[in-house]
Amino acid sequence: MPTPPDPPGEGPRGAPVGRRVVLGLLGLGAAGVLGGRTVPDALSRALAPVQLHDPTGLTSLVPLGDAFRYYSVTGGVTPRDASTYELAVTGLVEHPTTYSLADLRALPQVDHTWDFQCVTGWRVPDVPWSGVPLSVLLDAAAPTSEAVAIRFRSFDGTYTENMTLEQARRSDVLVALGMYGAPVTHAHGGPVRVYAASLYGYKSTKWLSGIELTDTNVPGYWERRGYSLDGTIET
Ligand SMILES: Nc1nc2c(c(=O)[nH]1)N[C@H]1C(S)=C(S)[C@@H](COP(=O)(O)O)O[C@H]1N2
Ligand SMILES: [Mo]
């Protein structure tokens, strides 16, 4: 199997190690990996430093297959749960709103199975996602006529992303609460992350904390480092 190219920019701090590699290194074997794609939250958390810094250098030696790579542009991210999580919808809206996790869970959820694709080349087919269509939150907030784009923020304190309002209203953009039939794990950006099926993975902000309506499409973290402002997956 070909080795994915080094991520241009996701490498230096984010050099990802596949779950299989990490579990192998910890002597945990591959059974849990092959049996399902999810890793218990506590384990993911424990593994995060290993994944972030890739002290093994094995990333380039081991085929990673169809697995997710865990990315974070920051070091450890303090987990949030139902008692600490908040999502603020702000900016150019008639009705700024703050949602708790319970608020988001109480909204009608949609389920879709869609691929996940990183701009660096790896791709995970057929991921079952669940969550609230972003358009539902946008409708509730009622963007003003000046609003043309969105700025997403993460509670990692660093990551931002952007999307046009038109992109954000598409039915394949979710405020995702679930993956693989379980709550989105901390490692995957839970309790709440963005998922946008037609856009590269970098548009899918993990640890989502803010949705700000803006009058320009402000480049996010990776857009400022050279990734496409638009982010549409090229097939
Ligand atoms: N907060 C935050 N969100 C993020 C990133 C990140 O580093 N920090 N990386 C992005 C990139 S480049 C990809 S490919 C996906 C990876 O998601 P995963 O870690 O669940 O595999 O998250 C995206 N969202
Ligand atoms: Mo990515």
Image: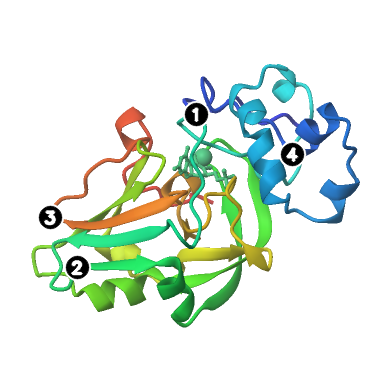
For disc 2, the marked residue is 96
Judge by depth and name the residue closer to the eye, 74 or 126.
74
Q: What residue is drawn where x is 68% and y is 63%?
A: 180
Q: Position of residue 59 (x, y in %)?
A: 71, 24
Q: Position of residue 12 (x, y in %)?
A: 51, 19
The numbered mark, 3 or 4, whose residue comes first in the sequence reads: 4
3 or 1: mark nearer the eye:
1
| Residue occupying the far front of the picture | 83
Q: What residue is drawn where x is 59% and y is 58%?
A: 184
The number of numbered discs placed on residues in the rendered structure image is 4
3 or 4: mark nearer the eye:
4
- Location of residue 139 by image quarter: bottom left
Q: Looking at the rendered structure, which numbered label has been put on residue 101?
A: none
Report how far apart the C-alphas of labels 4 and 2 lie in the structure. Answer: 39 Å
3 or 2: mark nearer the eye:
2
| Residue occupying the far bottom of the picture | 108
Say which element carries label 4: helix
Quadrant (top left/top right/bottom left/bottom right) for the N terminus: top right
Amino acid on which disc 1 is placed: Gly
Amino acid on which disc 2 is placed: Pro
Q: Looking at the rendered structure, which numbered label has been put on residue 19?
A: 4
Task: Please give left or right for residue 186 compared with residue 63 in the image.
Answer: left
Judge whether 158 appears above or below 97 on screen.
above
For disc 1, the marked residue is 75
The crowd level at tag 2 (other Cα within 10 Å; few <14, some 14-19, many 20+) is some
Amino acid on which disc 4 is placed: Arg
- Whether label 3 touches label 1, CB < 8 Å: no
The numbered mark, 4 or 2, whose residue comes first in the sequence reads: 4
